Image (cartoon, grey):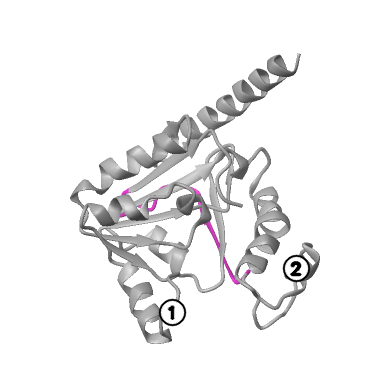
């Protein structure tokens, strides 16, 4: 019985992923279903072959794929502003260069089942690079990011699930980092500052979206 339950849950999550993939393609994104993280990593490595500079948006979904060593071994220049011991000026330079890199990699905070991508940023560097600048953008969407409701439900998911965990990960002094519950704070270290909704692929940006039938990131 337990095995049958697991198989049914896997089947259901795959159908949701495939539904989202179809919806994203209808909205002009280049979307692909990936059975697992390994398939997503292989896709990215293939797309990265002709890229010299690769930017990382600070995504745990991308970090879960463990690509940095493999991309570095290929001689790629990795633009990662999250490296330890960077000075403020070094970090600023990397953030700026991400806006015009050959390939930008990131996750998303939530995706509605009908194909809208919703993100909330603190600086805005991640969402701005998604929208315009890099030669190519690849976004990783784990099945846990799929919301069956509307954009308001996607924002609620981000505020209640992603943001509290991320503030704690980033050692921010916000109420949600202590309680795990969003109170729409006005803390100086608040990370919910820039909300973007990609209803369709931005017209001048080559965006690939990998919908992964595996939990990815927060």
Residue 194 magenta: yes
**Residue at (33% x, 79% y) in the render:** 93
- Mark 1 or mark 2: which comes first in sequence? 1
Using the image, determine if residue 79 lies above or below residue 40.
Answer: below
In the rendered view, does 49 fall on the left or right side of 85?
Answer: left
Region in magenta? 192-206
- Magenta stretch contains residue 98: no
Residue at horizontal 51 percent and vertical 28 percent from the top: 18
As helix, strand or loop, the secondary structure at mark 1 comes to loop
Q: Label 1, label 2: how many angstroms apart (C-alpha)?
A: 26 Å
For the residue labelled by badge 2, is the local secondary structure a helix, a strand or a loop? helix
Q: Are marks 1 and 2 in contact (CB under 8 Å)?
A: no
Q: Is residue 157 above or below residue 10?
A: below
2 or 18: nearer the viewer:
2
Quadrant housing residue 183: bottom right
Rendering coords of residue 16 (x, y %)? 59, 29
- Residue 131 occupies quadrant: bottom left
* Label 2 crowd bin: few (<14), some (14–19), many (20+), radius 10 Å: many
Residue 176's disc is: 2
Q: Position of residue 25 (x, y in %)?
A: 42, 35
At x 26% / y 41%, what residue is drawn?
46
Residue 99 % position (x, y): 33, 68
Q: Which mark is residue 85?
A: 1
């Amino acid at each position: 019985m337990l095995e049958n339950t697991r198989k049914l849950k896997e089947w259901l999550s795959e159908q949701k992923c495939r539904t989202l993939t179809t919806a994203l393609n209808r909205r002009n994104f280049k979307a692909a279903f990936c059975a697992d993280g390994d398939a997503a990593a292989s896709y990215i490595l293939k797309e990265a072959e002709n890229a010299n500079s690769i930017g990382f948006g600070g995504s745990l979904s991308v970090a879960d794929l463990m690509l940095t060593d493999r991309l570095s071994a290929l001689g790629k220049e990795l633009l990662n502003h999250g490296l330890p011991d960077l000075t403020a000026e070094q970090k600023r330079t990397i953030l700026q260069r991400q806006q015009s890199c050959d390939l930008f990699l990131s996750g998303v905070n939530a995706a509605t089942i009908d194909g809208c991508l919703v993100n909330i940023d603190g600086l805005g560097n991640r969402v701005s690079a998604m929208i315009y600048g890099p030669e190519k953008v690849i976004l990783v969407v784990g099945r846990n990011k799929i919301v069956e409701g509307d954009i308001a439900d996607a924002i609620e998911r981000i505020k209640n699930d992603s943001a509290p965990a991320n503030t704690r990960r980033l050692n921010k002094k916000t109420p949600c980092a202590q309680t795990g519950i969003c109170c729409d704070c006005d803390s100086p270290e608040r990370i919910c500052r820039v909300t973007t909704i990609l209803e369709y692929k931005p017209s001048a940006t080559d965006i690939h979206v990998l919908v992964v039938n595996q939990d990815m990131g927060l």
